[in-house]
Image (cartoon, rainbow, N blue to C red):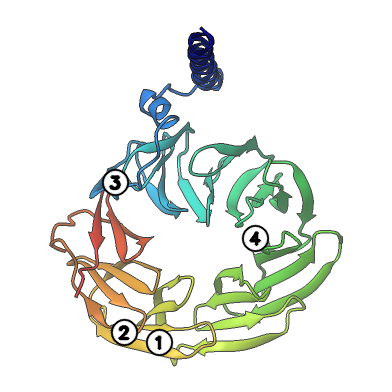
Amino acid sequence: MAVDDNHKGSKKKKRRLLSVIFSLASLLVLTYISITLITGREVVFSRIAELFTQKAPLQQADEFRFDVGRKTVFADIGSSIAAAGTLGVQVLDQSGVESLRVPFRMSAPVITTTGNHGIAFDIGGTSVCAFTDTEVSASLDVEGTIVSAAINENGWFSTCVQEGTAYKSIVTVYSDSGRSVYRVSLATGYALSAALSPDNMKLAILSLTDDGSRITIYDLGSENPDGEFSLSGRLILEMGFLPSGEILIVALDSLIIIDITGSDSELFGFDGRRLGGYILSESFIALHLLDFSVGYSGRIISLDYTGKLLGGILTDKAIISMSGGDGYLAVLSGDGPDFYDAEMNQYLTDRDPADTAGASRVISLGGGAFLVAGDHIASVYRIAAE
């Protein structure tokens, strides 16, 4: 009789355990649905199933389709792809599934990303939207018209705006939640862009003056600049912080490194050629240098961040876009994309490069895969195994 009682007790314990598990599972599902509906997002039932199953690695899609309106621009964000257009922002994961959609009207959309963070804005507008691959981290309106915006790897971002009838330049730094933490009003010069250091402690502002280009460096805890660097009569195209804390400058005639005091040294000169385009990947720099002659005659070279030349090729094509990542370089021309390693050795891919009519951008996906994108559809090219 005692054996039977124990057996019945065991069954009751199992039923009680199953009941608890079922209740917890139901609570988890209801919580997911409630949060999704409150935030206005679509309930994706396949994601409910993922709560109870082990996730398989995402399979990279062969094509990505975007629906963000006209004037589409693209950028990689983490292991996903972000697109911005006149209707808003969309992010697709590696398998081509939408992970984020943000309605956001823009006339001249721009998107820029660093690591897992991105920011979209409308040049000449007043709104900016900071996001990751799955959620909006901050959305705000600024006073004045936006000239540029940038975000760092921690999700902190900055805006450059022109304010008032005198077109005063204002640069504001925001935390990753969108809280204003620092503001600079330039007494002279027209602010073109700004960059935040990886530790969120320094701000560099690129401005155009009557004399040329100027970079002013601020500590976020100080009202006065820590350093300044000027190029008299010359144009700076871009600048950004390196992991070392130094700042890399891309000018029309050279690459320059400056420290936080403004002291400079030339990294690489262009030897009398004109700059047609460039990319700054995590491990190397690629430059498209044009000869001073009629047509597109020139060369594409690669170098590391010490200025050492890694390789180069001659080209006579009109280069539309370049992108680099994981030691590879993609070069998009009217004939389609070509693929190289950092030493400019050419590689074949798994699909016909000629099938790229209307493509306007190439983006590295990492691991030897590249996205060749048009207005609404983008195809993935993978470097073929030898």
Image x and y of residue 253, in percent: 50, 83
Q: Amino acid at mark 3?
A: Asp
State the residue lying farthest toward the front.
1
Q: Nearer the viewer, mark 1 or mark 3?
A: 3
Which of discs 4 and 1 lies nearer the camera? The answer is 4
Q: In what element is the residue under mark 3?
A: loop
Element type where label 2 sits in the image: strand
Task: Locate residue 38, reporting x and y percent.
Answer: 56, 18
**Lower position in the chain sequence, tag 4 or tag 1:** 4
Residue at 35 percent across and 44 percent down: it is 56
| Mark 2 to mark 1 CA distance (whole Å) | 10 Å
Q: Give the residue pinned by disc 2.
A: 299
> Disc 2 or 1, which lies upstream in sequence?
1
Check if mark 2's residue and mark 1's residue have beta carbons within 8 Å: yes
Residue labelled with disc 4: 194
Q: How far is disc 2 from disc 4 in space, using C-alphas?
A: 30 Å
Amino acid type at circle 1 is Arg
* Disc on the earlier residue, 3 or 2: 2
Q: Residue at x 39, y 33 (%)?
A: 53
What residue is shown at x 40% (from left), y 88% (from top)? 310
Mark 4 surroundings: few (<14), some (14-19) or many (≥20) residues within 10 A: many
Residue linked to disc 1: 273
Q: Is residue 105 left or right of residue 267?
A: left
| Mark 1–mark 3 distance (CA, rounded to whole Å) | 32 Å
Residue located 45% across and 88% down the image: 270
Tag 4 or tag 2, which sits nearer the N-term?
Answer: 4
Marks 1,3: beta carbons within 8 A: no
Crowding around mark 1 (Cα neighbors within 10 Å: few <14, some 14 to 19, many 20+) is some
